[in-house]
């Protein structure tokens, strides 16, 4: 799915965030033009985007010679950079929108799908989202926050959460974080003061054994910080989801981890077991990570049924039904974001295609050897 395009910039001296429209009378900031330029109507817009190969005919900030706007819908929100690059920030017809708060991280996970970058991008993303958040439709059901590690924004992390709470009070916010920052009580207390009950933190835990968790995230002391952070969050009544990525390092102690979670982290609102995404670091570490989902199906069933039997809310993400034991199909969710979700040719013959979560686009290059259409019984 296309999320960006590029043209030739004209009179753009700073990044512009705005809603796009083809309607000259609409309440939006950016006008899309594919035909004749309505010079009497463009004055009310902050910026013009056009497929026409012209520049000085438009006496205002613009990007011209853009290949097309087929990927944009009325009301989508974009970021137009001074280079002429146009990034889609929010899609009105999608339930899979997210805000990338930073590309920096204090972990370096073996299977990270978006490897961290060692540069200070705090101001760039903060300034972008200060403009974006007030423009997001009030009926937005759910919005994700991701990174990098979002809490590395420091005080600006909380300022953006406050902006979300005030502008989108009914929107569910799901924030992916490694949880380590919350080992410091003053940080967790600052989050607790927001009393933001629409916010849930998705925090990974990869083993009940500290050295194994630290190895997976490539950070000494990470396990102890994460566990302390989880307890601090619980004290502040902050909603928590636990995430376990399934691979060669986490599978051997999966049953023990399930028991550890039930006995030590019973306040977790949701636990999800997640299939591996073949992107980022994963292809480089594939020998350390890959295990066919069929080969760990019994262990996964044991862990999931244990937690479910004790009343915990459990899900399976990023899995295919044909590689998942039928006795745990009820826990499988269609979790992969629409812009990177695919199905193989074999899947088109499957009787349960509409119930199956499919694959990541990147997993076309690496997936279970047992993917096979399920025929109607």
Image (tube, rainbow, N blue to C red):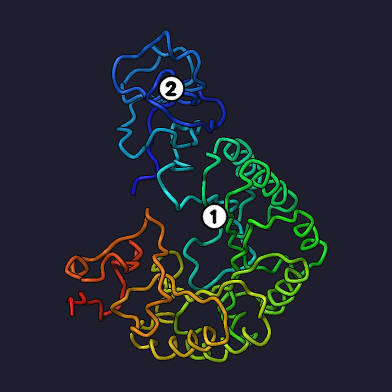
Residue 282 on image: x %, y %: 43, 71
| Of the two numbered discs 2 and 1 in the rendering, the one whose residue sits closer to the viewer | 1
Q: Quadrant of residue 128?
A: top right
Q: Considering depth in this image, is 167 or 153 the residue closer to the camera?
A: 167
- How many numbered marks, from 0 up? 2
| Disc 1: CA contacts within 10 A as few (<14), some (14-19) or many (>=20) | some
| Disc 2: CA contacts within 10 A as few (<14), some (14-19) or many (>=20) | many
Left or right of 367, for residue 87: right
Left or right of 234, for residue 202: left
Residue 316 on image: x %, y %: 44, 74
Q: Residue at the spot x=21%, y=77% of the render?
A: 374
Question: Residue 144, which numbered label?
Answer: 1
Q: Label 2 belongs to which residue?
A: 48
Q: Residue at the spot x=67%, y=76% of the render?
A: 267
Q: Residue at the spot x=52%, y=89% of the render?
A: 306
Q: Residue at the spot x=56%, y=57% of the render?
A: 146
**Quarter of the image with the C terminus in it:** bottom left
Residue 80 on image: x %, y %: 48, 33
């Amino acid at each position: 799915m296309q999320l960006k395009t590029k043209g030739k910039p004209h009179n753009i001296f700073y990044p512009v965030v705005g809603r796009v429209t083809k309607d000259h009378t609409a309440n939006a900031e950016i006008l899309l033009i594919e035909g004749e330029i309505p010079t009497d109507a463009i004055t009310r817009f902050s910026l013009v985007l056009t497929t026409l190969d012209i520049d000085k005919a438009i006496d205002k900030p613009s990007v011209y010679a853009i290949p097309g706007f087929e990927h944009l819908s009325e009301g989508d929100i974009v970021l137009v950079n001074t280079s002429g690059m146009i990034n889609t920030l929010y899609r009105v017809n999608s339930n899979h929108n997210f805000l990338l708060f930073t590309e920096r991280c204090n972990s370096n996970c073996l299977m990270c799908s978006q490897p961290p970058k060692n540069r200070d991008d705090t101001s760039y993303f903060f300034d972008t989202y200060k403009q974006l958040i007030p423009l997001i439709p009030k009926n937005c059901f759910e919005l994700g926050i991701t990174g990098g590690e979002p809490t590395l924004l420091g005080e600006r992390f909380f300022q953006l959460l406050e902006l979300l709470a005030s502008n989108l009070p009914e929107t569910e916010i799901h924030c992916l974080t490694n949880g380590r920052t919350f080992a410091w009580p003053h940080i967790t207390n600052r989050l607790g003061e927001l009393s933001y009950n629409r916010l849930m933190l998705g925090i990974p835990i990869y083993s009940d054994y500290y050295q194994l968790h630290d190895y997976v995230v490539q950070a000494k002391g990470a396990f102890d910080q994460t566990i302390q952070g989880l307890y601090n969050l619980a004290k502040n009544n902050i909603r928590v989801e636990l995430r376990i990525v399934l691979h060669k390092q986490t599978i051997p102690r999966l049953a023990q981890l399930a028991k550890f979670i039930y006995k030590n982290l019973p306040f977790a609102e949701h636990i999800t077991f997640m299939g591996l995404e073949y992107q980022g670091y994963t292809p480089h570490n594939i020998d350390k990570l890959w295990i066919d989902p069929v080969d760990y199906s019994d262990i996964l069933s044991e862990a999931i049924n244990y937690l479910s039997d004790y009343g915990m809310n459990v899900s399976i993400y990023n899995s295919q039904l044909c590689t998942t034991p039928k006795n745990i199909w009820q826990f499988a969710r269609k979790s992969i974001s629409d812009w990177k979700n695919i199905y193989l040719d074999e899947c088109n013959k499957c009787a349960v295609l509409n119930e199956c979560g499919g694959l990541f686009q990147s997993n076309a290059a690496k997936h279970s050897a047992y993917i096979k259409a399920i025929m109607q019984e």
